[in-house]
Image (tube, grey):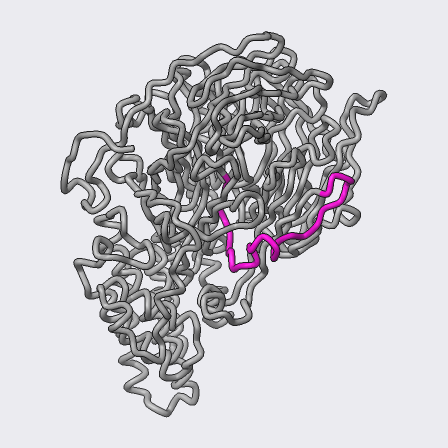
Amino acid sequence: MSARLWTVLAGVVAVGSVACGGDVAPGGNEAVVEELRMVYAETSPYNNPYLNDRRVALIRGLPTPPDRREQWALTGRLADELLWAGDTRAALELFGSMEATLDSVGSSWEEVDGLRAQLDSRFAIAWLRLGEQENCVANPTSAACVVPIDTEGWHELEEGSRNAIVYLGRMLERAPDDLNARWLLNLAHMTLGEYPAGVPEVFRIPPEVFRSEADIGRFWDIGAHLGVDVRELSGGALTDDFDGDGRLDLMTSSWHLQDQIRLFRNEGDGTFTEVTDEAGLTGITGGLNMQQADFDNDGDVDVFVLRGAWMGEEGLWPNSLLRNDGDGTFTDVTGAAGLAARHPTQTAVWADLDLDGRLDLYIGNETRGEPDRPNELYLNNGDGTFREVARAAGVAAVGFVKGVDAGDVDNDGRPDLYVSRLGQPNLLFMNQGVDAEGGVPTFVEASDRAGVREPLESFPTWFFDVDNDGWLDLFVAGYRADPGAVLAEWLGRDVPATLPRLYRNDGDGTFTDVTEAYRLDRFLYAMGSNFGDLDNDGWLDMLVGTGDPDFAALMPNRAFRNDGGTGFQEVTVSGGFGNVQKGHAVAFGDVNDNGDQDIYMNLGGALEGDEYGNAFYANPGHGHRWLTLRLRGTRSNRLAQGARVTVVVEQPDGSTREIHRVVDSGGSFGGNSLQTEIGLGMATGIVAVEVRWPVEGSEQRFTGLELDSAYELHEGEDAPRAVELRPFAWPTGLAPARAGEHDHPGGAP
């Protein structure tokens, strides 16, 4: 669109924006609900490219330009916004009128061939999206949109994919090396049950590229059958016990400020009940990410909601600290706690950085141009309030921060901080302890010495012990890719993307890049991601959500099994994780108390029309032993976040093995359960559990624990307290059924 038309659009936006004035005092939920309404009303659709419905209305209000080329461009702008808003048929109708215009002008427009090529691409994506909407979104199955798409994922309504194939064919006639068009052509044929035979041989992707490197067992997505497949945009996901009944519940958010945060109570019988309203959460909206913790040491799991990411100065939205009141309700205490600063963000981490027994909060903010939006460090005062000390602590980093995590990388008992930045070197802040004079923990930036500054375009990150040697390793995912990068990898070509980094901790303050050695030098266009133990073998695996806002960015989410600490095996296909919808927050947790970790995952996109239902992947079980621990601090923070756990087990051959874990919620985008769920592989017995509590100098050794059991371990108590679990089975017969089509009671592993 011409600069003149954008100027007119800006004027329309200025007139059309909703005016709301006055500050809302911090306080209870009514105040924050009103504040969020005001923020949404004042957000400009001219500056915010994700308010697609409002942008449609504004464009429709523009005068018709006199120049026919500008008319064509304006029609295209409106069609794009309609597509992004979810009104795909209206967009296709306008694309059709644009095609008719090109037919009528013929060669009188010198650029007509380029415009036809551009329009063919828009047609192809719109038809593909229509197929998704009418099939995968409207009538989901456990196999919908999961590549390679099998019988139960085939589209019943074929119009979208049929027409997409036509336009993708035209694109490949012009540019046979267009890898993204080639991939989407194969994908469209998959949705119709015509892959591989129906794909022209020259463009056919060899079926063997979809073979997994190990069989992890199928994790069927039963979210639709459980009623937890909230159809929403990109957002957060948590698994934790929010009502104190001993069972893991589910919480989910969606980043649009009109999208409701939702809470589902686990009934303990394979069903869930939405209790959003009863919990006092109605009207609390938005949130691209959430991180849970017990910030006030009352034993209840609280939630911090992050907002404003990707919006620049339009994203000066309030975050929310939701205090769990212990009676099934939450109260927003953001202002009262001193956390009311507004900066665009989606990432934060809870950790006891000054080792005073109270959890502190480090927030990574996004700076895009001026002014700087430095990261914030809030120390917990112990009275429900926090004080901001980032500059004094030396961690007020500036950058387009997409991930932060905490972990004790040098085993000195003090949590360190890692900052993942998009477009700049990453940062590692080493905790030097509390400054005696200022009472603030101080940090030294050591990423260069440690060798962990890359990748320069990065997103999610986390510390975990990948090789079970007792030293925390570091994973950082890349976030830059050209279209077709996923196919380039499958075909063995150079991958036009920023690859992830896996850094092995050398135990001397430095790390070694083992990405290639561990077979993770792959295309991971990662957003929401997390780690857990898929098969309970005692080695930590990972599930990586992929994509970007572009509707053409249809690429499978990817899963990797840790092969005994020697490398990773891709298990995307065998596990059923390869959904091509946008992979956002990932949360592992043993939701049915049988010792295996299930997964709750957000699959929505950023644009208003890119809704998709959340997935719930039921773990099929692998026959391995397990142990669940609920740590309870006394000197340390109540839920013992940051505690180091070592489980010593007996092996079938009589030897012993150590398995190392940290009590935390996992990676930077999604929240695993804060109970520590530990796979023990083929262990024949538990020798001991050793705990290093977060407060300095507090270590304990517990004995007398049984396999396949759960315990509370209390700081200062010698004996573990047995916890009675009430395992239940997921319903059977769900894999092939469309949502709501069948009801098969019964048991499943």
- The answer to whether one can see residue 202 in this image is yes
**What residue lies at 33% left-to-right and 18% top-to-bottom?**
726
Give the quarter of the image for residue 698. top right
Rendering coords of residue 435 (x, y %)? 82, 24
Rendering coords of residue 149 (x, y %)? 29, 58
Rendering coords of residue 248 (x, y %)? 39, 25
**What residue lies at 24% left-to-right and 48% top-to-bottom?**
140
**Residue situated in front as seen by the camera: 90 or 698:** 698
Rendering coords of residue 63 (x, y %)? 37, 67
Looking at the rendered structure, the number of numbered marks drawn on it comes to: 0
Give the quarter of the image for residue 315. top right
Residue 124 to residue 240: above or below: below
Q: Main secondary structure of the magenta part?
A: loop
Residue 393 to residue 65: above or below: above
**What residue lies at 57% left-to-right and 30% top-to-bottom?**
655
- The answer to whether one can see residue 24 in this image is no
